[in-house]
Amino acid sequence: MTGPNLEFLEAGGDVEQAYRLLLRLGGADHDALARHLGLSPDAAAARGSRVVGLGLATAQDGVLRPVPPGKAVERLVERRLARSRDALEAEVARCGIVDSLHDERAAGLAEASRVGRDGPPVQRLESLDDIQAALDEMTFFTRTENLTAQPRGVLSPHHISHSRPLDMRVLRRGVAMRSLLGRDALGDPGTMAYLWELADKGCEVRIARQPVERMIVCDRAVALTSLDPEDGSKGALLTREPGLVATLVKLYEQMWEAADPLPAPSGATQSPGARPEGVERQVLDALRTADKDEAGARDLGISVRTYRKHVASLMQRLDATNRFQVALLARERGWI
């Protein structure tokens, strides 16, 4: 293809050809794609699924509609940035640079103790900037588990906009994420929409029946709690002291067990024979085009663990004995 193309965003070649065709036509079904691109029906369906999987088009009732060019390029840029970020984070974890830097700080605290200065195991954070920096560091380096509890429940639009990239980054890495919120969340549409979004990406969410303590615990190794349980604006305590962190984890587990599961969106409960929607529909399409779970998860911007959870759900609903039967049975039911 001559002139500017999408190769540098890893979406050139056949995918770009199909997307440009959709832009010219304004939309097309798989038969139209096959006719214009000179493909078999199965090949056209696979091409269309790749275009949808990359976020360049939407699919409804068998018709593909192109996403506006500006939005399409934005999604490709975000996808490539996410992959680069994941690679850098993996290298950070592999080389042990964070542990090395923490060793430097520990050595400094030990030296401070020897000369008579304080070196407390719990750090007091009073400014918003310091608290935010601590949160960013905690979530950036989380590798296994992220636990959060929000007593108030209602999340402001500013809080959501700041938290979304951090939460999605954690979920893409396959980190087990749990979020516990106060009951006021149930009455706030913005908060509930974000909680359903998190749940769709693999986060476990519960709504507390009783008051809960504000906290964030990462990898059961570091925790952040409020200085004043009644007023989060007064600062926070950051601790890596194993005994204190273990106590906070135990408290979190008790609060979690006493909470209720996140209610499903109105009308969202699906019967086993219902047509899949949302991420599950995208996973179904990805099963036809991606040869490995890792590739399918990467294309959809979700973790491999979450991807496999949706695959297992589809297999159960279709009574398929393996994932290769899923696409065949889904086509027989008219799902694809």
Image (cartoon, rainbow, N blue to C red):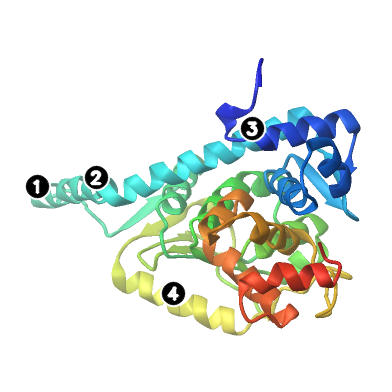
Residue holding disc 1: 115
Left or right placement of residue 152 versus residue 7 in this view:
right
Mark 1 or 2 closer to N-term? Answer: 2
Considering only order in the chain, which callout, 4 or 2, is on the residue closer to the N terminus? 2
For marks 2 and 4, give the CA distance: 25 Å
- Judge the density around disc 2: few (<14), some (14-19), many (≥20) Cα neighbours within 10 Å: few
The residue identified by callout 2 is 101
Q: Secondary structure at mark 2?
A: helix
Camera-side residue: 321 or 249? Answer: 321
Tag 3: residue type? Gly
Q: Label 3 to label 1, Cα distance in Å? A: 65 Å
**Figure label count:** 4
Q: CA distance from mark 1 to mark 2?
A: 22 Å
Which residue position is annotated with label 3? 13
**Residue at the location (51% across, 80% down)?**
253
Q: Residue 250 placed where, x, y %?
A: 44, 79
Q: Earlier along the polypeptide chain: callout 4 or callout 1? A: 1
Q: Of the numbered discs in the image, which one, if any, rests on residue 249?
A: 4
